[in-house]
Each structure stands twice: as structure tokens, then as C-alpha cells.
Amino acid sequence: MNTQALIDGLMRQTTLLIAHVATSTGLRAPLAHVANQVFLDLTSQLERQGLGQKVIADMFGLALRSYQQKLQRLSESATDRGKTLWQAIYEYVSEQKVVRRSEVLQRFCRDDEASVRSILKDLCDSGLVYRTGRAEATGYRVTPAEELYAEGHATEAGLAALVWVHVHHHGPVSVEQIEERVRVDRARLDGTLKALVDEGHISVANDPMMSGIKRYRTEECVIPLGARQGWEAALLDHFQAVVRAMCIKLGNGETRALPDDEVGGSTYTFDIWPGHPREAQVRGLLRETRRAISELWDEVTVYNAKSAAPKSTEPRRVTFYCGQSASLDEDSEQR
């Protein structure tokens, strides 16, 4: 199996999706942090697979020392322990009305100066921070929230749907775990969680094993068909379902599809044209599949509301996903 070709193909398709999402609202979403975040998330997942730092460094084509330095630079500020350097600089600028570049460099004198300058540029390029003046007189101030979350950015309803999806997939989870995944201002996240709890979408309970830390969970997550708000959450939900199915199958050591599989997926491509005897049936596959699944979901939901699962049985969550595209030229979507 050509694993490298598979990885390259997955990366191309993922970056294609990110590019479409970044321009979907007519605006240009900031992407300066993406490369660093991919590195951190990928190394974290490799460590969870049981790989050591030396092996991971070799996979990235880095010497162990270079890998460790890069990981430290991206993971934690030498000045403010427990925070990434990016996060520490952004919080420092947020606390000031206007702060000069020299003051930022002095504040983070224990960190690599080139990294500090690079992060300041990243914050400005992403629109999170405004830059005024030139050279040593350069000053920085945080972009006001009302400008940052203007129309075209995440709406409150969209954020609520996104948080709901994360709680559904990963719950029970703490607010810190949600914050790490959703990456939104803590005060705004707290308000969103409270609204979801008040509306009965999610529930909260104290974890006795974690000194009373609150954890959020939910038994269901529904983004209504046709809803204008929450499309981001629906897209993420579908993407997560696809990835999870593939990861479970690979984790089980399976690389082939069998008729009785409960985990996995199948892809079928049909070539049809106007007047084709099966045109209506093929083009209506998504509609009919949605209708059948919705009816089944309603029946299961009604039954579960009346009947509890046997105490001796561990409920199994089955996630089914389906998707459909139609175009004159499949390759045109990849250019």
C-alpha cells in the first residue's frame, strides 16, 4: 500500500475543504495559524498512538533537538508558563489599550524575539490585532469584539450549534476541553453553554472523580434540515462522522469492505444524462435516503423516550452519514 500517496491525497482534500470554508461567507477567514495548529494537533495524536518523540521527529524530517525546540516554541511561552506564546502575547495586548512593539518584546524577553515578532505579524494579518505607526513607534491594539464578530463571522446561533455538536461527540466534557476544541473567547463560550443548558439541549453535572469539575453532555444533537444557522456545525458533524468511521476501521486493522460491515463506508459514482431511464432515481438518492433515515430516527427517538436501556447493557451509538454531489466535471471541483 502506498501510504505516502494516501496521506498526500487526504491532505489535498482537507485543504480543499478548508479553502472553501474560509471563503464561504464572502469574507476571508484568517488562516495564518493553520500550519502551526496542524503540527501541534498531529504530534499530539501521534503521541496518543504511542510513538516517542524521536520517532515523531524523524517522521517530520527533523532532528530530535530541532523538533523539541519547535514543539516548545509552539506549545508554551517561556515567559508565561502554561500558555502558548501566541495565546500569551494576544492576552497581553488585550489587557492594554495600546502597547508598543518594544514593550511587547520586553515583556516576552525570555522568548525567542523572532518568534514574538512573527506572532505579532500573525495577529495583525488575521485581523485580531490592529497595528499603527512604523518602526519603533509601532503600536498594537486588539480588534473590538463588535468588529471581530461582524456579519459574516460566527453568529451566536452558529456558535451554539458548533458547541452542541462538540458536546454530543465528546461528552461528557469540561468547559476547558470545549474551549480547546472550539477556540472561542471564554466569556462568550460560558454564555453559549448557559443558553444551551437553559434550552435543555445539553446538561451539566459535577464530576466526583475530578474535584467537582462541571462536565457537559447531551444524548442528541439536531440541526434541522433547511436551517440557515448552524451550517458550520452540520458540516463539522458530517466531516467528523466520516473521519471517525475510517479511524475506527483502521484501528480495528480492517482495510477492506465486506457485505456485513457495521463500520466503514462505500462510494458509488453514476454517469447519467437527461432522459436516462434511471436519472430521477439516481438524482433522488440523497432525498430518499434522508427521508428513510429521518423516519427511522423518529421511531428510535420515540421508543427511547418511553423505554430505558437494560442496566446490564452498554448502549451502542451508531452514526450513519450520507452525502451526494452532482457536477458536469468532477475534476473542476478540485482546481
Image (cartoon, rainbow, N blue to C red):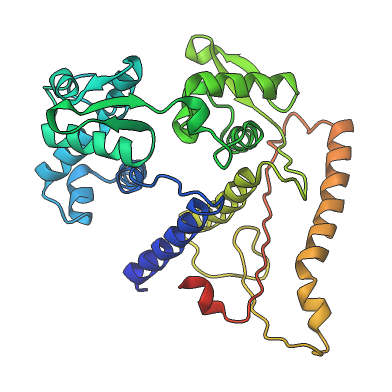
Residue occupying the far top of the picture: 211
Q: Quadrant of the N terminus?
A: bottom left
Residue at 18% across, 33% down: 134
- Residue 252 point in image, percent of width and height: 49, 56
- Residue 76 point in image, percent of width and height: 24, 28
Instruction: Look at the picture and state if 168 lies above or below 332.
Output: above
Q: Which of the pair 243/78 is nearer the observer?
A: 78
Residue at 12% across, 44% down: 66
Left/right placement of residue 229 relative to residue 147 reads right
Q: Which of the pair 133/29 is nearer the observer?
A: 133
Q: Which of the pair 146/225 is nearer the observer?
A: 146
Left/right placement of residue 130 relative to residue 310 reads left
Residue at 40% across, 44% down: 30
- Residue 3 point in image, percent of width and height: 35, 68
Q: Quadrant of residue 305?
A: top right
Left/right placement of residue 112 relative to residue 159 reads left
- Residue 184 point in image, percent of width and height: 48, 29
Q: Quadrant of residue 220?
A: top right
Q: Which of the pair 181/225 is nearer the observer?
A: 225
Count the numbered circles shown: 0
Instruction: Look at the picture and state if 179 lies above or below 287.
Output: above
Residue at 68% across, 43% down: 317
Q: Quadrant of residue 114?
A: top left
